[in-house]
Image (tube, rainbow, N blue to C red):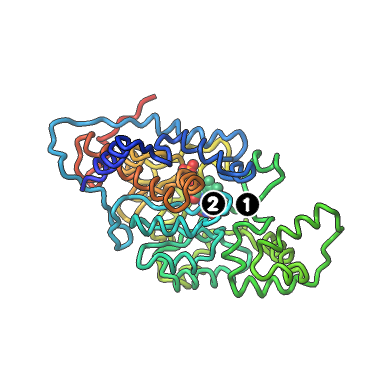
Amino acid sequence: MNEGRARQEEIYLGGLRGRKPAVPIDAQQLERKAQKKMSRRGFAYIAGSAGLESTTAANRESFERWRIVPRILHDVSSRDVSVELFGRRLPAPFLLAPIGALEMAHRDADLAAAKAAAAEGIPAIFSNQASVAMETCATAMGDAPRWFQLYWSTSDELVESLVQRAEACGCEAIIVTLDTTMFGWRPRDLDLAFLPFVYAQGIAQYTSDPIFRRLVEAHESESLGPVTPRAVLSLIALARRYPGSFSSNLRSRRPIAGVRQFVQTYSRPWLSWRDLPFLRERTKLPIVLKGVLHPDDARLALENEVDGLIVSNHGGRQVDGALGAIDALPPIVEAVGDRIPVLLDSGIRGGADAFKALAIGARAVLIGRPYAYGLAIAGERGVREVIRNFVAELDLTLGLAGCTSVRDLAPTNLQRVG
Ligand code: FNR
């Protein structure tokens, strides 16, 4: 296949007709253009990270230290970027990372992202903090691959219900995100005193869940607290956004009760290895742990019969001063060997980054913020363009490095400097 050259031709020939890509290819321009399309709060939420944002910087710096060492005079006219993951062949080693509250980027939110992933044949990972219920996204995706990302809440019943729904939606893996047992300390959001979930944004998987709804009912009779003008405005905004009619939402206290229930339910800081069998007993799907950075945790995951790992520091949003994700990869790959697939995200900004991760031993990588920016700029089409640009760059990098298949990549294709 020649995705890279096809994409170049499309863009350059478009240039002859006076067309430039609506979604910038350059990572920084992509972010800047998306910023213009988003509210201040929306951009702060998506772009922001923990503390001094040094982990986000480390994600990039560590990619910079790994350099590709191209080889010459190999026939690279035919190249293959497809990979196999949990019994499915994917056209390229990319997945869309689970990103919550995508409605802050675009009103079509997760639905647009899911359709874009389906159109490009790469898996969408439905976030537990999605703005659109997984059933709606799944219906729009046909047979295309999709996974579900779980935040392990304080309610086992809710965990079970979400996993059952994911299975019924045709999800092919359950990702358990383990680096967010609490929200990180994120100055951009703190300075705006804004968290989307408190405004009922990004809680669609909860409000569409029968178990969660039952939990909410128990709170509906509780007092609202002091009624200030600001509180009334917030209540109106919540009543608009929450499922159900505006007037019945205003009359009942459901939206407030729903948000309160979410705050009580979200995440379980006491989650431990002992809890994993609970999940194992409830699903046959592969269980993939996201947020692994230490090789000892990778070893423990193997002992606990986990099916896959995602090396990730959540794009630097959780622990400031953490290790750059790609630097965590080599010891984890060494600990795991070929036993289970290791994926990576955090700092992937183009196809060359994917090449590096795959050469170190990742099976595939997750695209994070860049697709949220594509979404902000041009909805479903914007996400598709970002995916196509990443695939094109990977394909060209592969060939220009003297390789013909991502499956042949090895650490010898790289050199670590500095
Ligand atoms: C995330 N991420 C995330 N992860 C997850 O497991 N569930 C979630 O709901 C979210 N939500 C979320 C929101 C936003 C706005 C961002 C930017 C990220 C983390 C995500 O899956 C992935 O790990 C990071 O996005 C990778 O970092 P980069 O490459 O985007 O910087």
Q: Position of residue 338 (x, y in %)?
A: 30, 52
Q: Quadrant of residue 260?
A: bottom right
Residue type at the position of mark 1:
Met
Instruction: Name the residue carrying label 1.
Output: 182
Q: Are marks 1 and 2 in contact (CB under 8 Å)?
A: no
- Name the residue at 54% across, 60% down: 128
- Name the residue at 40% across, 55% down: 116
| Label 1, residues with CA under 10 Å away: few <14, some 14-19, many ≥20 | few
Q: Position of residue 267 (x, y in %)?
A: 61, 58
Q: Position of residue 164 (x, y in %)?
A: 49, 73
Q: Is residue 18 left or right of residue 45?
A: left
Total residue callouts:
2
Asked whether residue 294 appears in the rendered view, the answer is no
Q: Is residue 166 left or right of residue 319?
A: left
In this view, the residue farthest toward the top is: 418
Q: Position of residue 318 (x, y in %)?
A: 58, 44
Q: Quadrant of residue 54?
A: top right
Above or below for 102 versus 418: below
Above or below for 319 versus 277: above
Instruction: Name the residue carrying label 2.
Output: 106
Q: Nearer the viewer, residue 261 or 306?
A: 261
Mark 2 residue element: loop
Q: Nearer the viewer, residue 149 or 115?
A: 115
Mark 1 residue element: loop
